[in-house]
Amino acid sequence: MAIRLPAKGGTPGLYRLPRLTPVDGILKGKLPPVERVVGLDAESEYLFVTTAKHELLALDLGSGRVDTVAVAVAKAALGPDGTLYAVDTLRHVISLSRRTRFAWPQALTAVPRDLFGATDQHLVGVIPQDRLLVAAADQPATVRPIAAGGDVAASRWGDLVAVASDSGVTFYDPLGRRDPGFIRLADAPRALAFSPSGHRIYVARRNVPGLAVVDRYDRKELDGVALPGPVAALRLDPLGRWLLARPAVGDSAWIVDLPIKRHTGIVPTEWQADLPAISPDGMLIYRHGKDVLSARPDSLTDVGKIVGGAADLWVLTSWLPRGVPASPVASAAGADTSGTSGPEGPMYVQVSTSQNPEWSGHLADDLARAGLPARVLPPQHTDEGYRVVLGPYATREQAEATGRRLGRPFWIYQPGQ
């Protein structure tokens, strides 16, 4: 789904991907003019935004109710478990988890210039004078010095923070369980982006065209990605299949197919905080003039268009309203999505099988958080395991199209076969 937030305020609009087809009568409530989208927690069905008056608002997508979470907000971030963190100008922290709001008893030592949500309801921030701050509601904050640098990035789960300096990238474990690691690069890094799994970090160099690729565990530079010129910003899709790079000069987006590490195309577009972006179902959504377009990133074939949508803010999400039928992720490949049980189906993309139901459940949860239709199929016979699958899909073609975008081993499973 794509959610449209009117620039002048009002009721948000809802559109089904990949063709940006309007879905009327679902979203309710009215928002004031929105300055920034903090994030969307699909489980609680809350969309969090900030306004020009520095208010942090929560829109209940189910009921349309709009609540004020905090005022005088300086920084806000949404954690991987759906916990919202807001730091006001007086350094006080407000968190919201599973619809429960909590004012932290202790203020932070400083207002972070970079703020990230982490696991176990921790927040991680970089505060002035180059210090890494880690805090939780039930324990005092810890502050550690870090290397002076520029761009900062955190892994999806907040378990690793990367800081760019003049000569390379330094990795920090926020909880101090491992010593910092430094990767020296031939040119000063400019922009950083973790892969969704957190295994790799992509680094744009200030003067050298292309990207460096660093392995977080081996702490060494791997093969890079060639690009036409230097890059100013990076943005990955939820699955780590596609990377968007903003060139240092000009308004456009370079498209990189990460499994083959190749620059495959370019679209002229204005780069903003929300767009261009790759949606959870693998579509490229970008502004073109006064309009918003959806296209397949492999061919750059436009499949959807919202006239006059460029002035508004956009949220791309795997959230599905109650009563609205799901469409397979493979719709981005142009497959028929009219049903999930065709002559061949139902078909599933199986990514794992295990005798451990708890482990399988955790894996399915991780895939679901990445926007995939993941589930666990219990054993049908005593000698089978718990299958972690995506789907169902109506045809093998749809299932294989999704599997090819995963960047990991998969096979097609059909119950009873």
Image (spheres, rainbow, N blue to C red):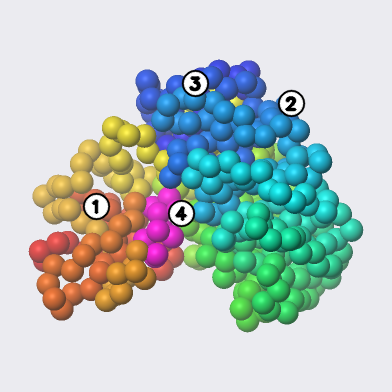
Q: Are marks 1 and 2 in contact (CB under 8 Å)?
A: no
Q: Is residue 323 above or below residue 362?
A: above
Mark 1 / mark 4, whichever is N-terminal: 4
Tell me which amino acid carries mark 2.
Lys
48 or 348: which is nearer to us?
48
Magenta stretch holds residue 199: no
Count of residue discs: 4
Q: Is residue 400 left or right of residue 36?
A: left
What x and y, as percent, mark residue 288? 59, 31
Residue sitting farthest toward the right: 129
What x and y, as percent, mark residue 379? 18, 69
Q: Are marks 1 and 4 in contact (CB under 8 Å)?
A: no
- CA distance separating discs 3 and 1: 33 Å
- CA distance separating discs 4 and 2: 32 Å
Mark 4 / mark 2, whichever is N-terminal: 2
The segment highlighted magenta reads: 362-372
Say which residue label 2 marks: 53
Q: Quadrant of residue 33?
A: top right
Say which residue label 4 marks: 370
Say which residue label 3 marks: 29
363 or 407: which is nearer to us?
363
Residue 392 badge: 1
Tell me which amino acid carries mark 4.
Ala
- CA distance separating discs 2 and 3: 19 Å
- CA distance separating discs 1 and 4: 17 Å
Magenta stretch holds residue 363: yes
Q: Quadrant of residue 176?
A: bottom right
